[in-house]
């Protein structure tokens, strides 16, 4: 090799070594930690906690920073890792918020504090996410770096990550699960997905829910805890298998470690690279389970039909596929036109509630104001069908027989299910539910389904020729949110394949005929009281959701009570 070429090679090698040294830690800009105490929570009243804010040197307040939240304070040498990865361009400019769990201080030195860690971290529900979004993070944005830089955080979920170990890990996942609009990247080390406060349910719920846009990195070791609450090692593997089954972006690092942060600290840089890879490209939701894919159309999302109502209920569809619904609080009934617009049908519905069309084309409705069942003709004229009780929901069969639920509104009166024959005779056909609510018939009209809102059950009855009911059974087993004692099951509809769609606190829970929840489909605002299938082909869901009504086109068609019965195929047992 010529001497000049050798010299050039040595020079290039020296420069490369110098650049590598810079990247490996020498001359890497170092961020700072700003520490303070937060004690103003109303969501977790009386708690005090320590907060450390990492502010990278590269941060410019002119551009809101990405965010990483970590439970249990500073771990995994995170500030040093962030310094290096931000310097290398392997993660965006990110402000870290490291927060310890809340403690309610003892009243004296003779008493123990109340330690909130398990309550805040292990519990399901949106409490901790709300604490971050409504209380802590707004407070963080009131602080400044030592050089005076204001703290401005991006509000986009795609720009936010959250992580932790053990209970802090399930807490991170729960925050993203509840609020993927605010957190979409999750780091989970030795996660506590076991039976401390319901975390063991996640591996089941993930499989059933319509997928959420979350990317998650899981770490655990075969020597993790195996105690009264469960087996951490198998629980983490169950999480990974469920996330994969549902089509989530998930990766994992399994080892032989125990319940500690040793492995997490070693792999934290790689985890951060993976979580932030291809940013700012959006983290997207996967396709979901095969059962969901049988129902939902890719790319077809919810659409707003109308808003600004007091409380919507009673969606019903006529033979032309036109949908009608009630604004119970305003005492009005509305019609969704074929163009998708909403127009008033009744200016005074007499506080109409649950309703359904009959085979004669009339709209049968429970009138809460008069405690009657009314039949409205297309011109808006009504006729009394039955009176003497305040109905909740109803269904009309293909012969004109009507089943009506009467919950026992004041909490002391008994709950009833009424049957009104095509000739107008009224009789009680069931009692004993806590709060009878939604009601529908199976596609072959041999079974009646009634929601008991104040439990997690929907009952099944066999319909007899005279309209009476036999073989009553607690049948459909529903999921209940952590924040409630019951499912809040309300309106019910069947599709023509025999699935039962139930409006609940968690969204639409879709069951197979044997009574098992296959899918859970949330609505955009987290509320749903009732549903129907409308449109020309009865393949568009219409859901009443508090002050709004939403629609969504699906792959299946609704079974209508006024239509001729049809027998679905035998389900898998």
Image (tube, grey):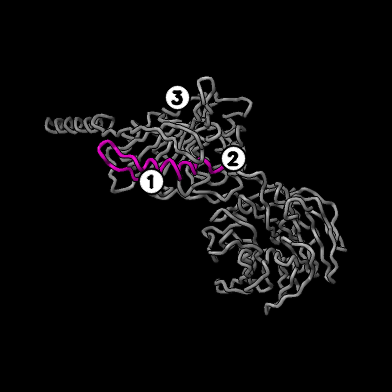
Q: Which residue is mark 3?
A: 262
Q: Residues within 10 Å of mark 3 (few under 14, many from 20)?
A: few
Q: Nearer the viewer, residue 326 or 226?
A: 326
What crowding class fits label 2: few (fewer than 14 Cα within 10 Å), some (14-19), or many (20 or more)? many
Instruction: Give the foreground label among 1 and 3.
Output: 3
Percent coordinates x, y for residue 148 in the rendering: 26, 40
Task: Tell me the number on the disc at residue 131.
Answer: none
Residue 120 in the image: above or below residue 207: above
Give the spatial CA distance, label 2 vs label 1. 28 Å
- Label 1: which residue? 278
What residue span does the magenta drawing correspond to?
A: 124-152
Residue 541 coordinates in the image, percent (x, y): 61, 62
Q: CA distance from mark 1 to mark 3?
A: 28 Å
Q: Is residue 362 above or below residue 240?
A: below
Residue visible at 68% across and 77% down in the picture: 380
**For mark 2, what is the residue?**
202
Q: Secondary structure at mark 1?
A: loop
Give me the residue at 37% from left, 28% from top.
77
Circle 2 sits in a helix, a strand or a loop, which is it? Answer: helix
- Closer to the chain start, of discs 2 and 1, is 2
The residue sitting at the top extreme is: 110
Residue at the spot x=27%, y=44% of the render? 60
Q: Is residue 146 magenta?
A: yes
**Where is residue 297 shown, x and y percent of the image?**
56, 59
N-term-proximal mark, 3 vs 2: 2
């Amino acid at each position: 090799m010529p001497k000049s070429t050798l010299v050039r090679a040595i020079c290039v090698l020296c420069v490369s070594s110098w650049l590598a040294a810079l990247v490996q830690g020498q001359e890497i800009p170092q961020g700072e930690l700003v520490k303070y105490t937060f004690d103003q929570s109303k969501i977790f009243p009386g708690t005090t906690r320590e907060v450390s804010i990492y502010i990278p040197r590269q941060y410019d307040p002119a551009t809101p920073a990405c965010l990483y939240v970590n439970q249990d304070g500073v771990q995994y040498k995170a500030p040093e890792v962030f310094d290096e990865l931000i310097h290398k361009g392997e993660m965006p400019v990110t402000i870290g918020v490291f927060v310890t769990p809340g403690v309610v201080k003892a009243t004296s030195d003779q008493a123990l504090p109340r330690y909130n860690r398990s309550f805040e971290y292990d519990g399901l529900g949106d409490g901790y996410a709300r604490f971050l979004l409504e209380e802590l993070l707004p407070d963080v944005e009131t602080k400044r770096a030592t050089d005076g830089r204001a703290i401005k955080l991006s509000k986009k979920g795609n720009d936010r990550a959250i992580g932790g170990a053990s209970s802090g890990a399930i807490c991170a996942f729960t925050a993203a699960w509840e609020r993927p609009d605010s957190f979409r990247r999750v780091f989970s080390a030795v996660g506590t997905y076991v039976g401390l406060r319901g975390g063991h349910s996640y591996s089941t719920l993930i499989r059933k829910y319509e997928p959420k846009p979350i990317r998650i990195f899981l770490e655990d070791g075969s020597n993790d805890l195996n105690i009264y609450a469960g087996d951490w090692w198998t629980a983490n593997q169950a999480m990974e298998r469920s996330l994969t089954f549902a089509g989530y972006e998930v990766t994992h690092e399994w080892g032989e470690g125990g319940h500690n942060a040793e492995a997490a600290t070693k792999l934290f840089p790689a985890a951060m690279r993976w979580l932030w890879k291809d940013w700012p490209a959006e983290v997207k939701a996967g396709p979901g389970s095969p059962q969901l894919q049988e129902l939902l159309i890719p790319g077809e999302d919810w659409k707003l039909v109308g808003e600004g109502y007091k409380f919507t209920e009673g969606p019903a569809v006529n033979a032309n596929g036109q949908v009608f619904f009630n604004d119970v609080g305003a005492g009005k009934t509305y019609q969704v036109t074929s163009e998708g617009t909403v127009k008033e049908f009744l200016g005074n519905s007499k506080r109409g509630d649950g309703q359904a069309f009959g085979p004669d084309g009339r709209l049968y409705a429970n009138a809460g104001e008069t405690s009657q069942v009314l039949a409205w003709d297309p011109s808006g004229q009504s006729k009394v069908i039955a009176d003497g009780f305040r109905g909740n929901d109803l269904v009309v069969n293909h012969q004109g027989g009507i089943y009506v639920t009467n919950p026992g509104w004041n909490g002391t009166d008994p709950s009833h299910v009424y049957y009104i024959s095509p000739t107008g005779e009224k009789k009680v056909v069931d009692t004993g539910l806590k709060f009878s609510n939604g009601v529908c018939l199976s596609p072959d009209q041999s079974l009646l389904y009634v929601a008991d809102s104040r439990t997690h059950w929907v009952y099944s009855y066999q319909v007899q020729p005279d309209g009476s009911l036999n073989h009553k059974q607690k049948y459909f087993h529903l999921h209940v949110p952590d924040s409630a004692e019951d499912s809040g099951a309300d309106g019910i509809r069947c599709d023509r394949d025999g699935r039962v769609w139930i409006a609940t606190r968690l969204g639409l829970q879709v069951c197979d005929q044997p009574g098992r929840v296959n899918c859970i489909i949330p609505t955009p605002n987290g509320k749903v009281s009732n549903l129907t299938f409308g449109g020309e082909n009865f393949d568009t869901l219409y859901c009443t959701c508090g002050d709004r009504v939403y629609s969504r086109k699906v792959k299946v068609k609704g079974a209508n009570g006024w239509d001729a019965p049809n027998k679905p195929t035998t389900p898998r047992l």
